Amino acid sequence: MAISKRDQVILACTECGEHNYITDRNKKLHPNKMEKMKFCRRCNKMTLHKECK
């Protein structure tokens, strides 16, 4: 059985706090928390989304 190096993460909007996206990342290549500019439906604009637990 293979051990996965990918980790499932949830991205939350920094302005309203809504959990909008579920994605995955490679734990070895990107050890730090993920940050991306994504569209938030509640804010109705592009905002920074950060990885949360």
Image (cartoon, helix red, strand yellow):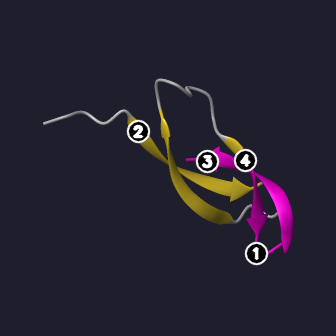
CA distance for labels 3 and 4: 12 Å
Q: Magenta stretch?
A: 36-53
- Helix, strand or loop under label 3: strand
Check disc 2 and report the residue beneath it: 6
CA distance for labels 4 and 1: 15 Å
Give me the disc on residue 41: 1
Q: Relative to 20, does residue 3 appear above or below in the rendering?
A: above
Tell me if 26 is positioned left or right of 10 in this view: left
Check disc 3 and report the residue beneath it: 52
User: Where is residue 15 shown, x and y percent of the image?
Assistant: 84, 59
Q: Earlier in the sequence, mark 3 or mark 1?
A: 1
Marks 3 and 4 close (CB-CB < 8 Å): no
For the stretch drawn in magenta, what is the main secondary structure? strand
Q: Is residue 29 magenta?
A: no
- Callout in the foreground (3, 1): 1
Q: Earlier in the sequence, mark 3 or mark 4?
A: 4
Check disc 4 and report the residue beneath it: 36
Q: Earlier in the sequence, mark 4 or mark 2?
A: 2
User: Where is residue 44 shown, x and y percent of the image?
Assistant: 84, 75
Q: Earlier in the sequence, mark 2 or mark 3?
A: 2
Residue at 40%, 38% in the rendered image: 6
Q: Is residue 47 magenta?
A: yes
- Helix, strand or loop under label 1: loop
User: Where is residue 51 shown, x and y percent of the image?
Assistant: 63, 46
Quarter location, residue 7: top left
CA distance for labels 3 and 1: 18 Å
